[in-house]
Image: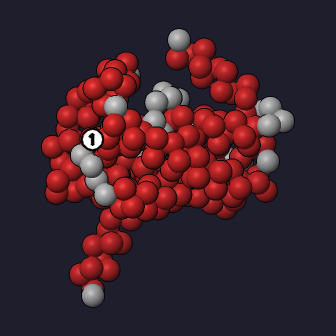
Amino acid sequence: MLQRLYDRVLILAGHRHAVWWLFVMAAAEASFFPIPVEVMMLPMMFAAPRKAWLFAGVATVGTVIGGVGGYAIGALLYDTLGQPILALYGHEDAYDHFAKLYDEWGVWIVFAGGFTPIPYKVVTIASGVAHLDLMVFVLASVVSRGLRFLLEAALLHWFGPPIRNFIEKRMALVATVSFVVAIAGFVAVKWLL
């Protein structure tokens, strides 16, 4: 089933309305869809490098809107819809772990989930269940998802097509290292001020 979805997404990346499909996929991925948005966005960026920034922006807007949908699933429909979505993808353990950490680390969990390979739909649904302040959730989502997608566009811009293989093979490493660097920057700024 997942292989067929993956293949379909690759076909959509070459469609003349691919930008709209990217938006739809980003919104769906943030709340229930199993395939990461990069599966569609990166081939689009490689095919049209001058539009990479546009694609990163479209993915950011779509994923934040979809994230609000995931938040609503968690806040309003967890028992009927949220829990079955998490169970379908085998993310119940990840949700339980996130739920325990929300009281102390809410905004950082959203940031980490939006920037790293942690399934973002788990974060969006858990944020709704935990009733994290919606504005805090949206702002953390915009920053984290925007940074993630803009970093991918920047890598393509700076390093050109050879970066394609590096990104595709080491996406988890790239996202995790970037997250660690961002946290180190926040800590350094706080320590210096």
* Picture layout, residue 178 above or below residue 16: below
Where the C terminus falls, by quadrant?
bottom left
Residue located 37% across and 47% down the image: 113
Within 10 Å of the Cα at label 1, are there few (<14), some (14-19), or many (20+) other Cα atoms? many
- Residue 115 pos. (x, y %): 43, 51
Using the image as rendered, state which of residue 14 and residue 121 is in the foreground: 121
Residue located 24% across and 81% down the image: 191
Q: Quadrant of residue 17?
A: top right
Q: Which residue, given by chain and number where applicable, does mark 1 sit on?
A: 129
List the single residue furthest toward the front.
76
* Picture layout, residue 160 above or below residue 94: below
- Residue 170 pos. (x, y %): 49, 41
Left/right of residue 75 with respect to residue 152 in the rendered view? left
What's the amino acid at mark 1?
Answer: Val
List the single residue furthest toward the right.
16
Query: Is residue 90 in view?
Result: no
- Residue 155 pos. (x, y %): 61, 56
Q: Quadrant of residue 50?
A: bottom right
